[in-house]
Image (cartoon, grey):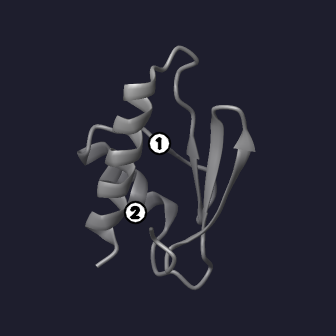
Amino acid sequence: EFPKELKEAKGIGLIQGLALKEESSLTSQDIVKSALNHHLLLVAAGPKVIRIVPPLIIKKNEVQQLINRLKNSIKSVSK
């Protein structure tokens, strides 16, 4: 959904990292700050990587909430 900003996602199990494209003007810190405004806690793992570490007991509907909040966070900073 964000081909200009996101390069790839990788990780193991629930621990995932989203890599931003080097040519993107966004930084991981931009998205982390925006995510806080959308009630989503993310971690910057370098200037171009966002780490997502949800709780192990996350429910299916909470995963959908996480995805929606992440999308809204990226949309609000990628204008």
Location of residue 24 with respect to 29 vertically, above or below: below
- Height in image: 51 above or below 26? above
Lower position in the chain sequence, tag 2 or tag 1: 2
Q: Is 37 situated above or below 22?
A: above
Identified at 53% across, 21% down, the residue is: 55
At a point 59% along the width and 65% down the height, the residue shown is 48
What's the amino acid at mark 2? Asp
Left or right side of 13 for 65? left
Q: Residue 13: x and y, percent?
A: 70, 32
Question: SS of the residue at dot 1?
Answer: loop
Q: Tell me where residue 12 appears, x and y as whole percent.
A: 75, 37
Compared across the picture, whether 25 is left or right of 23 comes to: left
Task: Report the quarter where the C terminus lies.
Answer: bottom left
Label 2: state its secondary structure: helix
Q: Is residue 17 left or right of residue 28?
A: right
Which of these two is toward me, 25 or 71? Answer: 71
- The spot of residue 32 in percent (x, y) is 41, 51
Instruction: Specify the amino acid type for callout 1.
Output: Leu
Inter-mark Cα distance, 2 to 1: 11 Å
Q: The N terminus appears in which quarter of the rendering?
A: bottom left
The residue indicated by pointer 2 is: 30
User: According to the image, label 1 marks what residue?
Assistant: 42
Query: In x, y percent, where is residue 22?
Result: 62, 79
Neighbours of disc 2 within 10 Å: few (<14), some (14-19), many (20+): some
